[in-house]
Image: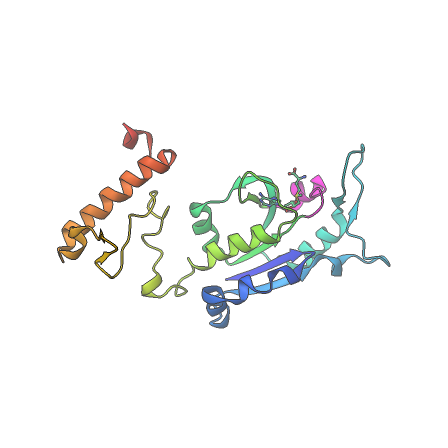
Amino acid sequence: MKIDVLTLFPAMFAGPLDESIIKRAREAGRLELTLQNLRDYAHDRHKTVDDRPFGGGPGMLLKPEPIFEAVENLARENTRVILLSPAGRRFDQAIARELAAQEHLLMVCGHYEGFDERVREQLADDELSIGDYVLTNGALPVMVIVDAITRLLPGVLGDDESAREDSFSQGLLEYPQYTRPAEFRGMKVPEVLLSGNHADIARWRAEQAHLRTRERRPDLLSETDNL
Ligand SMILES: C[S@@+](CC[C@H](N)C(=O)[O-])C[C@H]1O[C@@H](n2cnc3c(N)ncnc32)[C@H](O)[C@@H]1O
């Protein structure tokens, strides 16, 4: 999978995307990630990418010209152009799965007060938010989304790190997990997990996942399930 990120702050990405599983995925060629500096597409002497909003009001907006030029330069036929915006649809595990199946993503980070509306109207295939709060720019949201997508790409997670039973992958939160020792400071691991009976263990885990979801995130359960 190829992901281009259009940003004013490429240096912010050093570190989070150069460690651990993402680093391995990049080295193995499963994820080809390229940072594109939006300023490279501004051609005046000051490399201006922003301007004041028509009609007045606080802050600056990203101008359309550099973003249009960048997207037209980087997008291919199979590219999905995604704007990062608090007003976008809320990113979740289902969207991560949807994006992991794409060939090429072009993720466009906002800054200041965001984008000129024509960028949304003409260029964006999708607009994503990572939650109901406002960050200073789109770099952190892109890193969150790239991380969530990368671990779903085929061959990225080993057996030890399988995503199959992660929270949200079956519409439920994950069941409680334990490792050795079987007793720690008087706290015992549930007997069933030590029993070696795989059917009983699977049943216990399914029950626990339902209980935990009902208790903490009833919104994830379907209406019929909730009755
Ligand atoms: C300060 S924010 C702009 C907020 C904008 N004025 C609004 O009220 O929707 C600057 C940029 O950060 C990014 N950003 C901030 N919060 C975000 C979030 N929750 N999800 C996705 N992107 C976000 C977007 O790219 C946005 O254009």
Residue at the location (71% across, 45% down)?
112
x and y, in percent, of residue 170 in the image: 33, 46
Residue at the location (41% across, 64% down)?
156
Considering every residue shown, the one lying at the far right of the view is 45
Q: Quadrant of residue 179?
A: bottom left
Considering every residue shown, the one lying at the far bottom of the view is 27
- Asked if residue 118 is among those painted magenta in the image, a careful observer would answer yes
x and y, in percent, of residue 15 in the image: 57, 64
- Asked if residue 43 is among those painted magenta in the image, a careful observer would answer no
- Front position in the image: 186 or 142: 186
Left or right: 96 with respect to 184? right
x and y, in percent, of residue 187 in the image: 24, 51
Q: Please indicate, yes or no, whether residue 79 appears anywhere in the rendered image.
A: no
- Front position in the image: 41 or 193: 193
The magenta span reads: 111-124
x and y, in percent, of residue 86 in the image: 59, 40
